[in-house]
Amino acid sequence: MSTVAAPSFDNTTDDPRVRAPLTSPGQDLASVTELVSGVVERPRPPLGWYVAFVVSSAWTGVFLLLAGYLIGTGVGVWGNNIPVAWAFDIANFVFWIGIGHAGTLISAILFLFRQKWRTSINRAAEAMTIFAVICAGLYPALHVGRVWVEYWLFPYPNQMSLWPNFRSPLLWDVVAVSTYATVSLLFWYLGMVPDLGTLRDRATGRVRKVLYGVFALGWRGSARQWHRYERAYLLLAALSTPLVLSVHSVVSCDFAVALLPGWHATIFPPYFVAGAIFSGFAMVVTLMVPARAYFGLKDLITIRHLENMNKFILATGCMVGYSYAVEVFCAWYSGNPYEWFALVNRALGPYAWCYWTMVLCNVVAPQLFWFKRWRTTPALMVLVAVLVNVGMWMERFVIIVVSLSRDFLPSSWGFYMPTWVDLGMFAGSFGLFFTLFLLFCRYLPMVAMAEVKSVLPHGGTVRSEDV
């Protein structure tokens, strides 16, 4: 097949007033294919990719070694105690589930609302969802201790006539997370099928041609295939949309159904969903800014895309700040001394530094996005996005650890400190996440080529307002 030489784009500036993406005559649909496929087909990735891959792979190895140590020794190697029976394990689980929410929202909800700007970032956001759910799923699997009998969690006929306790939050998590992971994986894979067909047709090596051919499922781009593909994509988008609300609502009910002060609150489901979208968009920005720079995709993933995501961060950050204020009001208005003490303990107790770090990162830092310079400068937006994710992890720590450490009876109070295993596995989970994302960037199309082309005007000329 004939190919078009990859266009030379000016990537020296991100200022949209100076540089308009892909606006020169003659830069047509083939340019999109060349730009995205070139990342996968180039003989060697940038040096930065190798450095990042070595570091993340090393931390992945640390996570696997510590997981083996935990399974062989027991969960006592963590710092969990009584009364803090949940700590880093569940805090990290809720954190990673939240990270995965932006991918489904960008892919499904914005697709249903026909937001064309999503097409350049949805593929990477969907991949991030899958990898975050993998990291999240490891923690509930490990925190039960006896991982070799985890199949007991699944409802299946057995000779002992045993069935799982459907009132258990642990089972709710299994159902919610497995459903979310399955639908998100199908949605991500289905969206890649046309692009995998493109990579198959362009492949020069036999191994690549066979692998891309197998996963392309015989895609030829016929009218019948496009018709069925679009119907299936729409159905999966409609199925994924309620999952954005339901999954983290179920996770929040792990806490809300308990009677513990600081947990027993009806605001938790919307509060958790807003926080999940908040942290998820922050992680997308954190990943996409360096990815577009290192792989030369500034003409497809533009400042406009990043600015739109920053607006989402600002909006959901205001929702999270409002939720914090509602928590204070509910604790005061309820007249419940235990609820009020739990709130005061968060702000003034031994973990006060966690609480005020959470407020600073989640409420104050996102307000910088009211200023256009902060929304459109890559270094500044990454700084805010990192602070948001630090704050959102602190929020999970405050909700879980601080609430458990001070309950109804002073005689049962305790204090939690993470062990080196806790810290090592937390850092290792980031290593696993970044390793998977780096492999995705190297071997799969980071941008949905077919979707970007579908929103272009007839004739194929790319305009900044189209992508």
Image (spheres, rainbow, N blue to C red):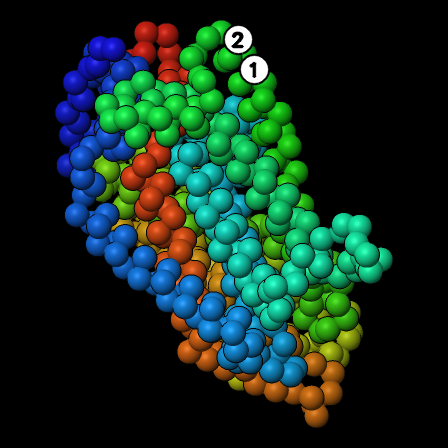
Rendered view: 448 above or below 308: above
Amino acid of disc 2: Arg
Rendered image: mark on residue 200? none
Q: Which residue is mark 1?
A: 228
Q: Position of residue 224 (x, y in %)?
A: 53, 8
**Residue at x-position 58% and y-position 50%:** 274
Quadrant housing the N terminus: top left
The extreme right residue here reads: 161
Image-quadrant location for residue 38: top left
Relative depth, front residue between 161 and 97: 161
Quadrant housing the C terminus: top left
**Residue at x-position 43% and y-position 57%:** 388
Amino acid of disc 1: Arg
Residue 85 can be seen in this image:
yes
Please state if 23 lies on the left or on the right of 308 as rendered. Answer: left
**Residue at x-position 44% and y-position 41%:** 127
Q: Position of residue 167 (x, y in %)?
A: 79, 59
Q: Position of residue 247 (x, y in %)?
A: 64, 48
Q: Tag 1: Cα neighbours inside 10 Å, few (<14), some, or many (≥20)? A: few
Rendered view: 286 above or below 395: above
Q: Do the residues under discs 1 and 2 have CB atoms within 8 angstroms?
A: yes
Q: Which residue is mark 2?
A: 224
